[in-house]
Image: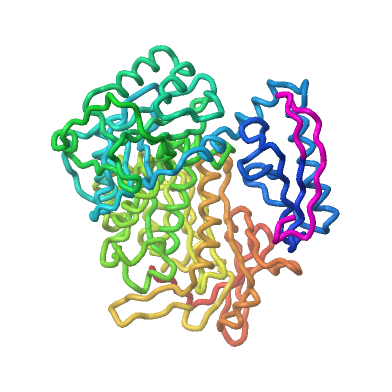
């Protein structure tokens, strides 16, 4: 029994498929059940039994967590998992099932046999066939460390575009090196990783013959870098998982790697690589193709959005969040329009950060989306929508959806006028009421629609849910400037409602006009100094999103607490107030 164990037990196991008689050791740590049971098989079945590691049996599959509960529950769970492992390894068990179990986690077995490279790799475009890979080190990591991120691509143009996205300027890539090769496995190599000098004979039998010839030609090429990467796409569909090998020659320090510049192939003297590789490491590699970026959403919605075009008029705290959410949801083409620049007072609830202070919001957000989601096409126009619409009418004509979040009535009424005249795009107008406890969106699908009757002459919404002293706006010491107060979380709630409505409109799930409202804890409005007149939430409901048709024109007047109040009767029966001194101002 080990020093940190309370008890241990040995049990004989049936003879396994190799003919080996093994025994099981169960160790109960002193902190059991807060610490997991330890199961060891002697002699070790590492690389012989599925789910066996060098240190013991792995009782929990990928991304699962150890079971918790009473000691009896923990023991039962461990023994149940052990039974499955042993059943795969018994004399007479199915070799096919055993190999399938190995293959389901094959990269875990490979990585446990490799050291890990210190460099991270980013593959900018996923090849569809065997291909050499050009390399460029991230130039922002100016001080050599041996850990610089390396960008890999099948062509120079992809490297140039990524350089421009990340650095903000265009450069010529005159002579990039080709230290990488991408190849698709047709079957699985052995679970046991070979000696470095046998890596080619380990891989090539599992490749297409022509791919194997290309790989060998690249690998044996005189002048190849002393550190090379072989990117292996596993068997399966075209977007199967990837494993990356870093093959290193003698003379390379373990914690150092080459740095690849714009002219590396010209400046670096050639190295003969006739001698066999000295070591193989595993490298972390991320892929920036659209399929990988959107792979965590298996619904397929992003496929429908790849060719959609959205124009976002307004990139403030609400519009900026909506634009970024639409990009992350898979919208392929986004145009941003906004005349304002980012100020420090915006940072608390805007998706942009301190590095963008003083920059136009539209341009800065375009650059952020380019950096974060390089497969999304984004254009930015710094100015008012009236000017942009006059100079670039074709941009609107090609759009599937216009989203306006400016809270500027002149811009909003212009778009509604165009929509009422039969503009081909769908229109979504959205805004927050003061303090962001309530937000609204009005959606018009394909066809001619006009929502201007829902607003007063100065853009006051006739059906708002809250009332605030002075209209709820905070004036700034500048001519005509003010902002709508509200925190980041409140704006995020409203932005999610707006983004979800936009996605439904783009995927054809909305065929009628809709008025959507997001309401969060209306009881807090009183504490903030306001009054709430919207629908009451049921007991226990903290937040709700309501959707219904646009209200009709009916209206009547009442007196309320000495103020003249107009009560609008919507077709859903909601009684929603509008005080005569309502005001909204752009942020």
Left or right, 477 with respect to 437, comes to left
Q: Which residues are magenta?
A: 1-23
Counting the numbered discs, the total is 0
Q: Residue at x 61, y 32 (%)?
A: 47
Q: Residue furthest top?
A: 209
Residue 425 visible (yes or no):
no
In the rendered image, residue 136, in percent from the top left (x then y), is placed at: 26, 40
Q: Residue furthest left?
A: 267
Q: Residue furthest bottom?
A: 562
Q: State whether residue 375 is above or below residue 320.
A: above
User: Residue 197 lies in what quarter of the image?
Assistant: top left
The C terminus, quarter of image? bottom left
What secondary structure predominates along the stretch shown in magenta?
A: loop
User: Residue 81 lies in what quarter of the image?
Assistant: top right
Left or right, 12 with respect to 97, comes to right
Q: State whether residue 151 is above or below residue 539.
A: above
| Colour mode of the rendering | rainbow
The N terminus, quarter of image? bottom right
Q: Residue at x 54, y 38 (%)?
A: 301
Residue 219 visible (yes or no):
yes
Front-most of residues 569 and 348: 348
Front-most of residues 391 and 72: 72
Q: Residue at x 48, y 75 (%)?
A: 582
In the rendered image, residue 576, in percent from the top left (x then y), is placed at: 62, 69
In the rendered image, residue 563, in percent from the top left (x then y), is placed at: 56, 84
In the rendered image, residue 342, in percent from the top left (x then y), is placed at: 31, 66
Task: Indicate whether residue 17 is drawn in magenta.
Answer: yes
Q: Residue at x 17, y 37 (%)?
A: 268
């Amino acid at each position: 029994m080990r020093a940190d164990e309370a008890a241990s037990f040995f049990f004989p196991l049936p003879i396994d498929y190799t003919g080996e008689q093994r025994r099981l050791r169960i160790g109960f740590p002193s902190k059991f059940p807060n610490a997991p049971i330890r199961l060891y098989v002697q002699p070790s079945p590492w690389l012989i039994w599925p789910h066996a590691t060098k240190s013991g049996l792995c009782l929990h599959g990928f991304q699962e967590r150890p079971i918790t509960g009473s000691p009896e529950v923990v023991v039962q769970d461990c023994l149940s998992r052990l039974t499955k492992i042993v059943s795969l390894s018994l004399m007479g068990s199915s070799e096919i099932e055993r190999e399938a179990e190995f293959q389901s986690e094959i990269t875990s077995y490979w990585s446990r046999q490799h050291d890990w490279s210190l460099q991270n790799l980013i593959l900018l475009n996923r090849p569809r066939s065997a291909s050499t890979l050009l390399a460029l080190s991230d130039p922002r990591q100016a001080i050599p460390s041996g850990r610089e991120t390396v960008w890999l691509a099948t062509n120079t143009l992809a490297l140039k575009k990524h350089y421009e996205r990340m650095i903000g300027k265009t450069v010529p890539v005159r002579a990039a090196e080709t230290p990488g090769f991408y190849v698709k496995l047709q079957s699985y190599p052995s679970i046991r990783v070979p000696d470095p000098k046998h890596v080619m004979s380990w891989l090539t039998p599992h490749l297409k013959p022509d791919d194997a010839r290309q790989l060998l030609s690249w690998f044996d090429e005189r002048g190849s870098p002393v550190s090379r990467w072989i990117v292996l796409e596993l068997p399966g569909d075209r977007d199967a998982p990837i494993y990356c090998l870093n093959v290193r020659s003698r003379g390379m320090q373990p914690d150092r790697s080459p740095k690849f510049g714009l002219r590396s192939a010209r400046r670096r003297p050639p190295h003969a690589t006739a001698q066999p590789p000295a070591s193989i490491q595993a490298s972390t590699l991320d892929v920036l193709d659209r399929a990988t970026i959107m792979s965590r959403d298996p619904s397929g919605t992003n496929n429908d959005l790849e060719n959609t075009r959205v124009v976002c008029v307004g990139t403030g705290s609400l519009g900026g969040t909506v634009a970024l959410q639409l990009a992350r949801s898979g919208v392929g083409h986004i145009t941003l329009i906004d005349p304002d620049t980012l100020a420090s007072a915006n940072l608390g609830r805007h998706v942009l950060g301190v590095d963008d202070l003083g920059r136009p919001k539209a341009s800065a957000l375009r650059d952020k989306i380019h950096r974060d989601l390089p497969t999304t096409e984004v254009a930015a126009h710094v100015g008012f929508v009236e000017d942009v619409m006059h100079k670039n009418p074709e941009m609107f004509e090609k759009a599937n959806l216009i989203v306006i979040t400016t809270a500027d009535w002149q811009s909003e009424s212009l778009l509604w006028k165009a929509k009422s005249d039969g503009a081909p795009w769908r229109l979504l107008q959205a805004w927050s009421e003061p303090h962001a406890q309530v937000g609204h969106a009005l959606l018009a699908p394909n066809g001619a629609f006009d929502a201007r009757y829902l607003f007063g002459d100065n853009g006051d919404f006739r059906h708002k849910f809250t009332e605030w002293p002075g209209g709820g706006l905070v004036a700034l010491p500048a001519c005509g400037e003010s902002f709508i107060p509200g925190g980041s979380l409140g704006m995020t709630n409203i932005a999610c409602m707006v983004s979800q409505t936009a996605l439904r409109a783009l995927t054809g799930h909305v065929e009628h006009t809709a008025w959507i409202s997001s309401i969060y804890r209306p009881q807090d409005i009183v504490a903030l100094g306001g009054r709430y007149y919207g629908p009451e939430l049921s007991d226990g409901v903290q937040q709700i999103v309501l959707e219904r048709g646009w209200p009709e024109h009916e209206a009547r007047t009442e007196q309320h607490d000495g103020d003249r109040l107009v009560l609008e009767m919507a077709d859903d029966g909601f009684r929603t107030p509008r005080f005569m001194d309502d005001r909204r101002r752009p942020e």
